[in-house]
Image (cartoon, rainbow, N blue to C red):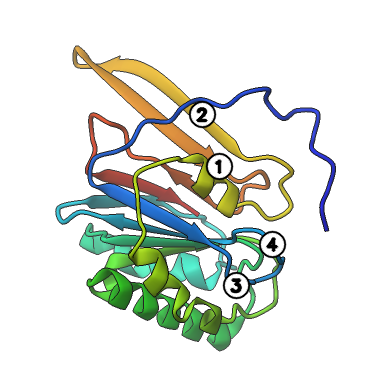
Amino acid sequence: MAHPVSPLAPKSYPDLPAVAGVRFATAEAGIKYKGRTDVLLMAFDEGTTVAGVLTRSRCTSAAVDWCRANLPSGVARGLVVNSGNANAFTGSKGRQSVELTADYAAKALGCKPAEVFLASTGVIGEPLDAGKFAGVLDTMATRMGDAPWMDPAKAIMTTDTFPKTAIAEFTIGGKTVRMGGMAKGSGMTRAIIPCRCFRRILAIAN
């Protein structure tokens, strides 16, 4: 169901720059809504380093558990983010779903499942049907690009009425750093775009 756009929605959005070594595509998998994108696939070049900040809650979702288990390797080749279903409080079915999603993505990107990180947002308590990604991720992997970043910002929306993006410029050690970011309104999942200076770093927060 469409909601009126919040009066807090910005009049314009920043033009986020392409990040070397990062490509992405979005698609409609029909997870909850029809006629809107709901899955984001990102691919990272070899040598990409991953870091994460995870919730301290003991009631974590299957995607958070998956990321926590694979973060120690420090290696990332892919990221899958879906909206419409948080895959939280889903028990063994949720674990099976993330394993299957990572497997689909790994085959599409040509990497190991443990090198794929996952984030989900949306309805709680309903198992995520990973079968909806079958074929979709393969197709996405053939049409990836480095712009526009507005597409990923829209794909991670569930009940949000507008996408959220931001960009900042600052100096570290005498070098100018530009960092762009996107976020989902209710805080269930966030992906920070790698900054141009540290283009092999991806920070994922769940």
Q: Is residue 6 left or right of residue 114?
A: right
Q: Do the CB atoms of the residues marked 2 and 1 lie less than 8 Å apart?
A: yes
Residue at image position (62%, 23%) is 12
Q: Amino acid at mark 1?
A: Ala
Q: Is residue 152 above or below residue 72?
A: above
> Mark 2 or 3, which is nearer the eye?
2
Instruction: Give the mark nearer the N terminus: 2 vs 1.
Output: 2
Q: Amino acid at mark 3?
A: Asn
Q: Nearer the viewer, residue 59 or 94?
A: 94
| Mark 2 vs mark 3, CA separation in Å | 27 Å
Q: Residues within 10 Å of mark 3 (few under 14, many from 20)?
A: many
Instruction: Give the mark nearer the N terminus: 4 vs 3.
Output: 4
> Mark 4 or 1, which is nearer the eye?
4
Q: Quadrant of the N terminus?
A: bottom right
| Mark 4 vs mark 1, CA separation in Å | 21 Å
Kind of element beneath mark 2:
strand
Q: Which residue is mark 4?
A: 35
Q: Position of residue 105 (x, y in %)?
A: 36, 72
Residue at image position (33%, 67%) is 116
Q: Do the CB atoms of the residues marked 2 and 3 lie less than 8 Å apart?
A: no
Q: Give the numbered dot on residue 166.
A: 2
| Mark 4 vs mark 3, CA separation in Å | 21 Å
Q: Position of residue 159 (x, y in %)?
A: 74, 52
Q: Amino acid at mark 2?
A: Ala
Q: Amino acid at mark 4?
A: Gly
